[in-house]
Structure formats: structure tokens, C-alpha cells
Image (cartoon, rainbow, N blue to C red):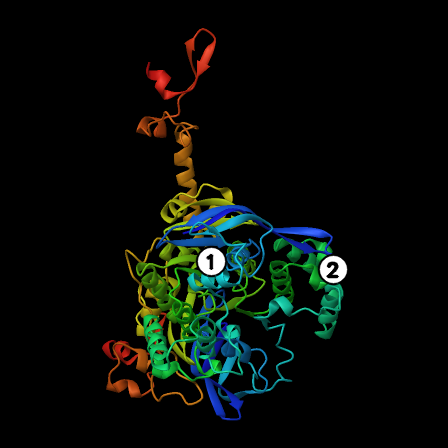
Amino acid sequence: MLELEGISKAYRVGTFGGRQLVAVNDVSFDVGDREVVSLIGESGSGKSTIGKMILRLTSTSGGVIRFNGTVISGLKKGALKEYYRNVQGVFQDPFSSYNPIFKADRVFRIIRQAFFPKIGNQEWKEKVNRSLGAVGLNSEHVLSKFPHQLSGGQLQRFLIARALLLDIRFLVADEIISMLDASTRIDVLNLLADLKSRGLSILFITHDLSLGYYISERAVILYRGCVVEMGKTEGIFDNPLHPYTRMLMESVPRLDKKWEAVKAELKAKQAGLTTGCVYYERCPAAGRSDDCKTNRPGLHEVEAGHFVACCRNNAS
Amino acid sequence: MSLQVENLTITYQTLRGDVRALERATFDVADGEIMGLAGESGCGKTTLGTSLTLLKPPMRYIEGRVALDGEELPIWDTDAMNPFRFKKVSVIPQYAMNAMNPTRKIGRMTSELLRARRADHKGALRELRRRLELVELGADVLSMYPIELSGGMKQRMVMVLSTLLNPSLLIADEITSALDVSTQKAVAEMLVGFRDREFVKSLIVITHDISILYQIADSILVMYAGQLAEKASTDVIIQAPRHPYTKLLISSLPKVGVKYAEQRLAGIPGSPPLLLDPPQGCRFRERCPVAFDRCTAVPPFVEVEKGHFIACWKESVVHA
């Protein structure tokens, strides 16, 4: 559905913009239909910049982003509007996403003016109610209220409802639950999971690994603008291979294990890996037989003066 | 007993009436104990922490007493608290990132701070260097301005400053929330290190992140809407909580290894009450799955097992 190919972003910094800060460096990944991909990284890793580039809120310095095969950077007026009909974002701070002077449903009205100018009042009302219902809000309780009269969780769901009005296919969720309280957090997370089963693809940007694990099929670990590890969520969490990912896994506070226990476990796993053939992970001929995984082959002579360390040759 | 708090009630004065942010809090913190204080935003955990150090309007002291090392703290009197603040009870504030004077070099600010407390700042300076090393800061930060430090570095600098006079009680308010996971771990472990080296006798760690508390705290006190809900040792709170709110809260936290497809977690329906005009009785009543008619009266915070306090009629009746 969405493809990123070699995306980069460089900001000009310094007094006269003389220096360059590369926030995102040659990042490629894709998000499939009905898939949730977590983009995990610490602050300054460029994860939000990637989200903004997908939403075309900032330009890219290099690389292409394709949505269903179309390159998005060249989209103009009508086509861009069509793109926004399909792709929307929800951001971290629900409180600053609203203009406090106006009632919160103004965000719906803007959508109506921009995308549905011809729709009738009754039909629009039904549409709004349906959309609010989908995010678990009761329209009687939340419509015609000012932002300060609604809770953070409600405001955040309001914004998701706004995105749903457009029948979007792709949602960029940038740290959408980090400002919410623990007891309402999980509801918003479950809501995302439900939307996924209705055919929505989600790029879930977060710094919290346990949230990423809960919701996503695949995870992309970002460090200083570069992808250091990506793959199936279980694979990355159970067997992190990049030293940075390992460090992250060690430091994430968990409720089931203390830090020392996590560290020891990862070490044990790593030790397990090193007992096998050193080339096991990349070997095309290994056939993933247990022999290659558990035994480290020693050097032996296959012909005069020719030594090799491989189980397969060992046997012959 | 290092800290004893009894019946502490604090309100905020507003134009629309008093906000009852902390209601009859009674608990102890033992010597060498790291007590975690957890709860959602607006539950009164920062109010509790701040009231022990700097109680100023619009905060208002209603009743209660606080004793530290057997000595009563005059928390209602801002001036009388002066000799205790920083020496006996110290705080790492929520805004630690912005707590330092931006117009002074850190070294100069430190010596001004020490002089203001009439402490021996020559002697303290040597100790300061030693402690900077412990938190992995070079002595050269003393000749830098706060703006030159990163968020994590500022946080650690304030940690060192707050504990320089070896206070008996240190209150750390949300000090890990704005940090990355790796820095978070380092800062959290430094707090434990400070306790182990006896720079501080006991600690109250305020945070909304229970998983951090599980890593470092000895006991956890859970608050809900201005009332204490449950206090017990960390393992008991995480593995066998008894208060309905704690149970729901713990079960709603996603853990590594839990996927929505396999195990769908449930949140707590409803939202916390407004404290301007809080409901009578147990404030969790309206969201509580096991509430019954008795809950219209405020449940007492009683010890049901050794070290396990709970404020719930269901639990305390059974064990009365």
C-alpha cells in the first residue's frame, strides 16, 4: 500500500543554515494492506519526520514515497486532495490539535467544507454519528463542546473519528497515546486494532516497545535516522540482533521481569547463538539443520593444505 | 520510621470552590525504602509530593501532620519549612529540565545555592565533584551553562544538586517521563544508587509509569482521585493487587509479549471524577465493577496484611 524507498531528510541548521543535519537517512520499508507497522525509536531518531513526510507536511530531500504505486511528492491540488482522502494523521498532543476558541466539532466542519461540500445536513449528521460511534464516543456527549470540556482520550478519539469521516485507507499515528492516562490508553490502542480489521493500514510511531508489540505485525527500529533492524515483531523482540535493539530491549521497563533478568536472558540467547556455526545465520547451504545450529565445526583438512570449518564437509 | 504522614488533606483554592486534591492521606515510609507513588494524571500524586516541600497558594493546608525522623514538619508554614527544605527533605521537580538558572554557569549557581543554605560550600564542592562522577558527568559541566547540557544531563545535574546536603527524604517527581528508555534506565538506577550509598535515606518516586516502579521501588502506593487506594510491596501490587482499581490498572497495561490478537486487554470504562465536587464515599465507586451500597461511605485505609494497606470496603470487611 505504502512504500518508502531510500527516503532522506536533511535540515539546514546553524546560524546561516550552513550545516546540515540529516534527520532521516536512506530509509526504506513498506506497509501492506491491513497491516500495522510500528516505527520505534528514541527522541531524535527521525520517526516523526518520516510520518510528516508521508503526510507531506515536510518535503523529502531524497528518495520516493509511493502510495498504491503513485509517487506522492508530485501530487498537485486535486490529486493531493484525493491523497488526503486516503491518508490522514493523528498526532501526539490532542490538546494542541484544537483551536481552543472554537468548539471541538469545528474539525468536522472543516472536513465537510473541504471534502464534502455538496452533502446534505441530515446525511452529514449521520456520517458524523457513525464515525463517532466507530471510535466509541456517544455523539450526544461530545458534540458542541469546547476542547477543554473533553478529556484527552475523548479528544484523541475525536481526531481519529475525523480521519474516519474520509474513509481513509492509511493512518499515520504519531505517538497518539503517550499523552493519555494508563486507564484510557488501552482503549485507544484497541480502537486502532479494530480499525485494522476493517481494512485500515496503520503506521504506528512510538517510543514504547510494549505498545508496539501489542499492536503491530512488523516493527522498524530506527536510530539516528537509519533503520537498524526491521522484521516481524515477534522476531525482533524475541531475538534482537542489532546491539542497539538489544540495548533497547534491555532498558525497556517491564512488568514481568526486572532489568537484570532481561539482561541475563538476552545474554543466554546470544550465547546460544554463538555455539553454532558462525555462518549459520547467512549460510544458504546450512539447510537449517540442528547440527549447524548447535555444533561449531572445527577446522579440518579436506585435501592437502586445504582447511575448512563446515559441518557438511566434516561428514563427507 | 523515616516519614510519617497522618490525615494529610490539601485543597486548591479556585474561584469555583475548593478542589479536594488530597484527602486524608495516611502512610509511612521506612528508612531506606523507595516508595513509588503511582496514579493517573490529576490523582493528586504531585500535590502530595509538593505539599511536603513547598506548600504555597493556591494550595491550602487543611489538616494532618507530617513527621520526618520523629521531628514534626511545619508544612503549613512556608518560612518555618526553610531549615528543613534541601537539608532534610528535598525534591527533584517535574520540570527538572528547566530548574536551573539559565543566566548562571552551573558551578556558580551551585555555590550560590549552598551559600543561601549556609552550608560549607568549600567542603561540599569536593563532594560535588565526586558525585558528578557517579552520575557520569565530567567536572567541566560546572563551567557550563544549563543550555549546553542535554535533557538527560540536566536531569542528572539536578539530581546531584538536590541530594548534595544528604537529605533524609527525597521526592523525585516524574523524573523519568521525558527521557528515552535508555536514559530512563540509567536515571532510575542512579536513584537506587543514591539510596544504596546513603546520600538519601528514603525516596518517594512519583510517576505514572508503573513498570519503572516495578524495576526500582520497594513498595508502591496507588492513588485514585485524591484518595489513597492501596499500598503494598512492589511484588504484591504487581502480582496480587487487591484494590479493584489497582487490579484494573495493572491488567490494562500492555506488556512485551502480549499481542491484541492473542490477548485483548481491557481499559477501565469511564473517567476519573472532577475533584471540584467529588462524589461522596469511595471515589472509584462509579467505575468500580464490585461497588455496593456500603461504598457511599469513605472506606478507611487499613492494613489487611503486614505492610499491605487498602481502602476498599469489599476487602477490609472480609479481613476485618
Relative to A161, residue B64 above or below: below
- Using the rendered view, name the quadrant where residue A300 is placed: top left
Is disc 1 surrounded by few (<14), some (14 to 19) or many (20+) residues within 10 Å? Answer: many
Determine the residue positioned at 34% across, 55% down.
A34
Residue A103, image x and y in percent? 47, 82
Q: Which residue is mark 2?
A: B144
Is any atom of residue A90 visible in this view? yes
Query: What count of labels does the image hold?
Result: 2
Relative to A31, residue A239 above or below: above
Chain at tag 2 = B
Q: Which residue is mark 1?
A: A205
Q: Nearer the viewer, residue B98 or B126?
A: B98
Residue kind at label 2, given as amino acid type: Met
Residue A188, image x and y in percent? 38, 67
Question: Helix, strand or loop at disc 2?
Answer: loop
Q: Is residue B125 left or right of residue A101?
A: right
Residue kind at label 1, given as amino acid type: Ile
Q: Nearer the viewer, residue B136 or A64?
A: A64
Whole-Å distance between the Cαs marked 2 and 1? Answer: 35 Å
Q: Nearer the viewer, residue B136 or A134?
A: A134
The answer to whether marks 2 and 1 sit on the same chain is no
Relative to B50, residue A35 above or below: above
